Amino acid sequence: MSKKKTILTLLLYFATLITTAQIRGTVSDENGGIPLSGAHILLLENKKLTTSDYNGRFRFRDVEAGPYTLRVTHIGYQEMEHSFDFDGSVYSIDIGLKPRTYEAEEAVVTGSRIEVSRHNNPMTVSVITAEELNESGESAILPAISKRVPGVFVTERGITGFGVSGGAAGKISIRGIGGDPNTRVLMLIDGQPQFMGLFGHPLPDSYVTSDAEKVEVIRGPASLLYGSNAMGGVINIITKKQRSDGFTGDARASFGSFLTQKYMGSAGYKKKNLTVFASVNHDETQGHRDNSEFYITNGFLKVGYQLSAHWKAKLDGSVAKFKSYDPGPASRIDSSYLTKRHWVDILRGMGSFSLENNHSHAEGAVKLFYNFGVHDIYDGFHSTDHNYGLTAYEGLRLFKNNTITLGIDYKQYGGVAENTEAMMGKGIEFVDTSVYELGTYIFAQQGFWDRLVITAGIRLENNEMFGSEWIPQFGASYLPFKTSTIKASASKGFRSPTIRELFLWDAANPDLKPESMWNYEMGWMQSFPDIGLNTEITGYLSEGENLIQLVGQYPNVTNENTGAFKHYGLEFQAGFQITQALLVNANYAYLHMDTPITGAPVNQCYVGGRYRLDKFTFHADMSYINKLYTRVNPVKNTQEYFLLNARISWQAFPFLQFFVSGENLLDQAYQINDDYPMPGITLFGGIHFSYRPDNNQ
């Protein structure tokens, strides 16, 4: 009898733990009653934060009695607050959010180092959310951005993996400014520069969707804030952090054509002032052509600690290890590809530490970063490189509607490159050097009458080899109506030659001069709340000088400053919430180049849609590419193609999702890299497991 009493007492005790001291509820669309996942629910009094699950449910445990206010936010909906008295037992609430299409307070970080509304930032900035990245079905970030951001194009060569060296892809172009390989669009992780010390360009395989909370893309020069390599624009990956107390986890596995496998696992933890987020990714494929295998493993760790109400510290690091094989040009395979497999074996890593402050009249940060890499290629090439430095900035709010940001950047990059098999096995060293750059800047923003914002800034950049360069920027943003924003800006872009261009291999030219350009643009953002439509249109003109290009015919080629260039174009994007279940996004970009370059289409169009029906979500997107130059020397080759992709997911349980997807469903024959045909129809299927202790009920 005593044993039964003991069991009954334990059951009652655990039942008490489950049913007492809880605040719980659901979040849904006020009009259609559709549950909203990913809503942020904040208890203002104790700063506890959680998110809603797929069924819109949330829960706070172990809450003391007292008065509380819930603040509920979700992208695309109006913020809501609810106040109540909690008696220490159980409080339940159903929250209905009102849709909104005018995102007046959408914050962007890269526009001015500190957070400002997108509508008050004269520069053209696109924001891709984690939800959009997940819906793309991509494990790598850059292909998803290439579809959703007008004027941005990323070259690919297969089902997954970009590759390097011969047959490389992953060239990033913004409005026709990028490079081959890309050295004119700067990749950032939480504001820290990501490029190889010797070659001056990022490796796109290193950036995965599982680590991103959002991605911000500046379409146009951002050299004022970020210095060299931001001449054409910036892609800033804002990494995830754990927001709710306790442990969360995600795992995903997918399998597809050409024995392609993709695995992802991530976990987050938060307790009081400590937050931790970590992830591991692994992709591999046999490729759609012989000798086109690809293998990569990525790892990421981020730790944050709230030191006080105004100070927090963050430490993060990542590593990527991959091996890629180059099958060679499809129609002109030479003997070297037949007798020896062309592979590259690469290790890339980065780490950073930041100390951030946030006060009522000031906010800023001091950040230290270090990037490194080890590269080995089949022909004996071996290199080690580094890129490290410091960034410090402080935004001061001295009086109403005013912000002045002061900043300083220092970075040193370089490395050693050699061929260990040259000179009959004795080896030969190509270069062993490093270069430093130091930049200081001031950027001011002033608002008038809650409608007009004027910005201006200037940077002094000093390069160890090329001396000093002044980099100005000006802009204005005007809100004639609540639903309208007119923008205009003029900004200078700047890039110093890379160590590769100056000193590596036969094309090296130590007499190169830095590149520079001016970009002028004007845009109009307009929302139509009554019908759920948001639109944005931008026109621009880019003029530059001293563009560095490879001149001549292989093997007699050299890097040279080829003189002036001019690009102009038009970009349009729209989002249409037709019903609460149906969302359509579209964008179009037109680019005119006085001198054609590879990897930048003249016409680029995208239409994508999402439809939710009960536990099913349907995605489809169409892309049209016209006059994409794959070769410009000695003859010009262009491509035109139309792609159709689709994805269906089924939320079988709050914690388990199944999905299938298909790419190039029309089986188009096309190329993005010259003479490297892309795969035909490709199919994938997989599962996604999600663990949320407050939501998996």
Image (cartoon, grey):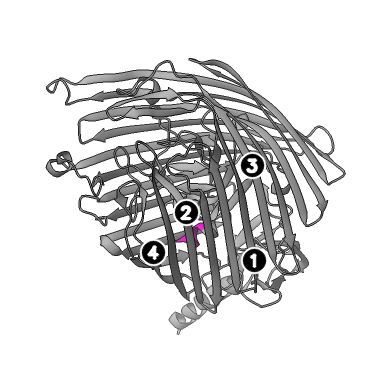
* Near-viewer residue (228 or 34): 228
Residue that label 4 marks: 664
Horizontally, residue 371 falls left or right of residue 327, namely right
Question: On screen, 526 above or below 581?
Answer: above
Q: Are marks 2 and 4 in contact (CB under 8 Å)?
A: no
Q: Are marks 1 and 2 in contact (CB under 8 Å)?
A: no
Instruction: Say if residue 454 shows up in the picture.
Output: yes
Q: Is residue 500 magenta?
A: no
The residue range painted magenta reads: 133-138
Outermost bottom residue: 1
Horizontally, residue 281 falls left or right of residue 133, namely left
Measuring from the top left, give residue 47's x and y in whole percent.
Answer: 68, 54
Q: Earlier in the sequence, mark 1 or mark 3?
A: 3
Instruction: Say if residue 227 shows up in the picture.
Output: no
- Closer to the eye: label 2 or 4: 2
The alpha-carbon separation of the residues under discs 1 and 3 comes to 25 Å
Measuring from the top left, give residue 408's x and y in whole percent.
Answer: 61, 24
Residue that label 2 marks: 626
Q: Earlier in the sequence, mark 2 or mark 4?
A: 2
Residue that label 3 marks: 540
The alpha-carbon separation of the residues under discs 2 and 3 comes to 20 Å
Outermost right residue: 449
Q: Amino acid at mark 2?
A: Asn
The alpha-carbon separation of the residues under discs 4 and 3 comes to 32 Å
Q: Residues within 10 Å of mark 1 (few under 14, many from 20)?
A: some
Question: On screen, 50 above or below 198?
Answer: below
Horizontally, residue 305 falls left or right of residue 28, namely left
- Closer to the eye: label 1 or 2: 2
Residue that label 1 marks: 576
Q: Earlier in the sequence, mark 2 or mark 3?
A: 3
